[in-house]
Amino acid sequence: MIARNLRKRFGAERVSFLFVDLIGQRLVRLTPAVEGDAVEHAEPVGLRGSVYDIVLQSQRQHVEPDGQGGQRVITPVTNRGDCIGVLEVTLQYADDTVLRQVGEAAHALAYIIVTDRRFTDLYHLGRRTTKTSLAAEIQHQLLPSASCCEAAQFTLAAGLIPADDIGGDTYDYTLDRDTLHLSITDAMGHDTDSALLATLLVGALRGARRSGCDAALQAHHAHQALLNHSRGLATGQLLCVDLETGMCRLVNAGHPWPLRLRDGIVEEVKLAVNLPFGVSAPTAYRVQELPLRPGTG
């Protein structure tokens, strides 16, 4: 639909969408089917050091001669900070008005993809440029639908490495009116059993969070879920960030200290550490306060 629209409005000669694969090392070029051809064509493209890499990192449109008298226009396809891919178009003429409208088309494409990928596996299929383990498959289904999120007060980015062979590691987040909720957890082990443990853990945390529980009660529910089902242990950090004041209230359950980037210096934040979730011992999870300020990472 987007390709047809660009051809009709601007006489675009070549239109393709390139999206980032599961492990973040390649792009997969999707070229719309042309008349007389029933299928779309997928082509893997190297990402690192390419012009596409520059566009994704800078989030700026790139224009260059195509070597045949036209203009090659590469535009980021992004939704609220979630870098989905790039839209590549070849045009014979591209002034500022045309470039702005191509940018608007790329923005519309991002919304279309975010909506459509809830109902089809085609995007998931296209992103699989390597074989994925069963544990990794389970883990990825536990993650939020977008690995990045932006608002006026913050930018959040997360990922699992290596993305094709993981087990036990998860992250989750949600954005309320005035609070950012974030969890980082690591279930014991690195196989399918740890992925199943992570499923129980994330389910308990989400259930508590969606019931209006604060970080302390979320930790309690997660701890009890692991105890009640005798599934093992997990470490984690649960954070609730007040977007008006910048105050972060958090619980550390046996997890490594976080790193903070401030004024160009990276340092560990030496928090009090509670026992991991699922430890069969009297446990009270302590909520700690960590003030955040603009520019902190």
Image: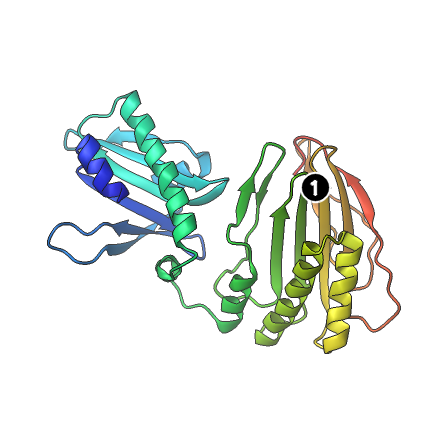
* Residue on which the image places disc 1: 260
Front position in the image: 132 or 17: 17
Measuring from the top left, give residue 295's x and y in whole percent: 65, 31
Left or right, residue 109 beside residue 201: left
Vertical placement of residue 238 versus 179, above or below = below
Residue 74, picture quadrant: top left
Residue visible at 59% across and 43% down in the picture: 156
Quadrant housing the C terminus: top right
Mark 1 surroundings within 10 Å by alpha-carbon count, few (fewer than 14), some (14 through 19), many (20 or more): some
Q: Say what secondary structure mark 1 lies in.
A: strand
Extreme residue toward the left, this view: 36
Residue 11: image location, x then y, percent: 17, 33
**Left or right position of 279 against 208:** right
Q: Nearer the viewer, residue 160 or 283?
A: 283
Q: Is residue 122 above or below residue 61?
A: below
Q: Is residue 2 left or right of residue 269?
A: left
**Is residue 49 visible to the viewer in this orientation of the structure?**
no
In-front residue for pair 137/97: 97
Residue 260 x, y percent position in the rendering: 70, 41
At x 83%, y 73%, the residue is 280
Residue extending farthest to the bottom is 230
Q: Amino acid at mark 1?
A: Arg
Residue at image x 47%, y 64%?
164
Occupied quadrant, residue 98: top left
**Residue in the picture at 77% in, 45% down:** 249
Residue 20 position (above or below residue 94):
below
Q: Quadrant location of the N terminus? A: top left
Q: Is residue 173 visible?
A: yes
x and y percent of residue 27 in the render?
A: 36, 50
Q: Farthest front residue?
A: 211
- State left or right for residue 140 relative to residue 190: left
